[in-house]
Image (tube, rainbow, N blue to C red):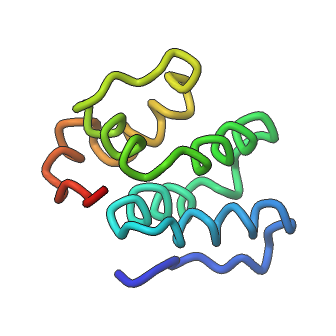
Amino acid sequence: MTGTQRSSADLDIRRRKALYHSWHRGIREMDLVLGRFADAEIGTLTEDELSEFERLMDVPDPDLFKWMTGSLAVPDNYDTALFRRVQAFHGGAEELRGAQEPRP
């Protein structure tokens, strides 16, 4: 997979930007984690969930990857239902831990 498999034609501008940003993170592992989730869920996120997703995308890739894989504790202010939903979408921390550790 090289990028989004979802059309953005039916999305408002905010969701289009979030979809694009989720696939253009900087490290491929996080593109796949956030991009695949966005492909599947971006159209159904509530406004509050979308805000939380945008906030997650502002976290530096190495930190977010470590949180997703469980190799670093998730700060309380990011340990949200949406974070756990993204993690569960990919089979949880154990499944994500099998991905290659990103370079800092």
Q: For the N terminus, give its image quadrant.
A: bottom left
Q: Residue at the far top: name it.
A: 76
Q: Residue at x 75, y 41 (%)?
A: 51
Residue 56 figure quarter: top right
Q: Quadrant of residue 82?
A: top right
Q: Taking 10 as reference, is 29 left or right?
A: left
Tell me: 97 left or right of 90: left
Residue 5 placed where, x, y %?
51, 79
Q: Is residue 16 left or right of residue 34?
A: right
Eyeballing the image, is 60 above or below 18? above
Name above or below for residue 62 compared with residue 83.
below
- Residue 14 is situated, as x and y percent measured from the top left of the image, at 82, 61
Residue at far left of view? 98
Judging depth in this view, the residue of 58 and 52 nearest the camera is 58
The residue under the point 31% across, 56% down is 104
How far across and down, in percent of the image, does residue 43 sit?
70, 57
Out of 95 and 71, give the one closest to the viewer: 71
Outermost residue on the bottom side: it is: 2
Q: Quadrant of residue 16?
A: bottom right
Q: Residue at coordinates 13% horizontally, 51% vertically from top-left? A: 98
The extreme right residue here reads: 12
